[in-house]
Amino acid sequence: MARKRSGGFKPPANYDPNRKPRRAGKPPERQRRSDAVTEGRARGDEQRGERPERELPSERSAPRSTSPIPQRLEARRTTAADAAGLSFQDLGLGGNLVRVLGELGAERPFPIQAATIPDAVVGGDVLGRARTGSGKTIAFGAGLVERLLRLKGQGAFASDPKPAQSRKQRGVRETRLATRKPKALILAPTRELALQIDRTVRPLARSVGFYTAQLVGGVPVDSQIHALERGVDIVIGTPGRVEDLVARRRLDLREVLVSVIDEADHMCDLGFLEPVQRVLRQTVRGGQRLLFSATLDASVSALVAEFLRDPAVHEAEEASAMPVEHRVLLVQRAHKDEVLAELAATPGRTMVFCRTRAYAEQVAEMLAEGGVKVTALHGNLSQARRELNLAKFTSGKASVLVATDVAARGLHVEGVDLVVQADLPDDAKVYLHRAGRTGRAGTAGNAVLLIPPSREARTRAMLAEAEVDVSFVGEVEPGFTHRLPG
């Protein structure tokens, strides 16, 4: 028999049983700030009504800071004169690596390679700063492979476990050989950069018996899991996919002895600081860390403070020494498309950078309609399409590549004669990385920035911050661009 309940719930006097529950939301002050930020972004992109693209859609990001570039870390500077006469053997690399480097076209070390490889092969932590196109990938790739080879020779690797004796009996599973776990990790901010790094590091690793695996988003994960199951020595990937595979317990980083962070400051700018920290904490405590970037500055101080021990800080050739002719063209909005078309039609290989994906597609369509062999690269394309379009540009089937800033960092294409920035970049670092797609490996290049006359003062301040000397600033109209000096 049920007990009789006494009393019971007595609703308050203002209780309304038909009132809908209030949804949780931002506090009014936070909401006002959010609205103000949104309104500011909308004003900045009023021409196309879209936010600029700074990364691939599969990666997490945080809003980019608009504060000035922090003061650079103090570094030992290495010049071309310092590297003159040195060979890769002098830096401590073995014969197989030197042979493969020669096959890759690297006969003599560039300054950043001469500066950092000796520290890397002996196991020291390294901070490396050098202009884009100066050979950072070979610097950390060759140094990492040589270091792993030495560690293996010293017995630092756990011996490959051997299966115990097992008899073939019905209902008894045979013991399988344990999977070889990675001993090195390379992190990059974008898929394209990670894949490009793998194309350089893989032949170096294979020459001494090591295997690599590409762990990037935007592609099916099954093939990456199969590669890990077969066993790899060097993992090259983006923070999101690496974390995902660690969470799935498909990737074990507990034996990683050497970790490389490429474009370290860009990782932090994109909001990858915490994911990178979580990944590095999975590796061997006190392991070797190599951080490289074209604009290495105090934005990576959190990584340096937590993971690096008395690092050697190296710098090679200031950005202002780039063999690139920089020009700023003041263009009225009504003339912008025609000026862009004239620049794209000039002989040679050209890259055009746009702030947003929609504008990149618009420019590509406009140039194609004008008879230009053009292709595009941005985050709205699938990974397969992006690789195909990049291959078209690299092979010469397309003379113009229209891209967003996902192509501004680390992407190496030989023989880019001209970089056109169709939109003013967010800051000086983005400008330098865009312009760095030309004038690579000591060759001359040209960079042109198109801006409306109203942005001249802001542009001059940004270029001064980037330490770039502009050789030509003036207002142009259609039909004048072919008479630009140089």
Image (cartoon, rainbow, N blue to C red):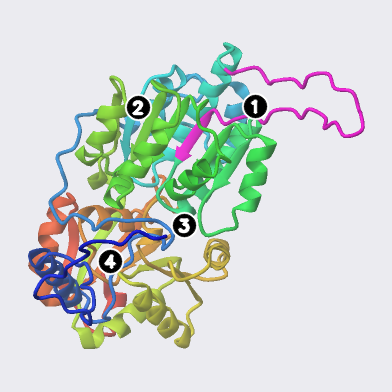
User: Where's residue 275, x and y in %?
Assistant: 37, 44
Examine the image and state in which quarter residue 249 appears. top right
Q: Is mark 3 on a helix, strand or loop?
A: loop
Q: Which residue type does callout 4 highlight?
A: Val
- Of residues 355 and 95, the one nearer the viewer is 355
Q: Is tag 1's residue or tag 4's residue first in the polypeptide sequence?
A: 1
What residue did someone put label 4 on?
Answer: 448
What residue did someone put label 3 on?
Answer: 415
The span from disc 3 to disc 4 (Cα, nearest Å) is: 16 Å
Q: Which residue is drawn at 57% across and 58% down?
A: 219
Q: Which residue type does callout 3 highlight?
A: Gly
Residue count near mark 1 (Cα–Cα under 10 Å), binned few <14, some 14–19, many ≥20:
some
The span from disc 1 to disc 2 (Cα, nearest Å) is: 23 Å
Residue count near mark 2 (Cα–Cα under 10 Å), binned few <14, some 14–19, many ≥20:
many
Examine the image and state in which quarter residue 75 appears. top left
Please give left or right for residue 263 compared with residue 297 in the image. right
Q: Is tag 3's residue or tag 1's residue first in the polypeptide sequence?
A: 1
- Whether the magenta-drawn stretch holds residue 335 is answered as no
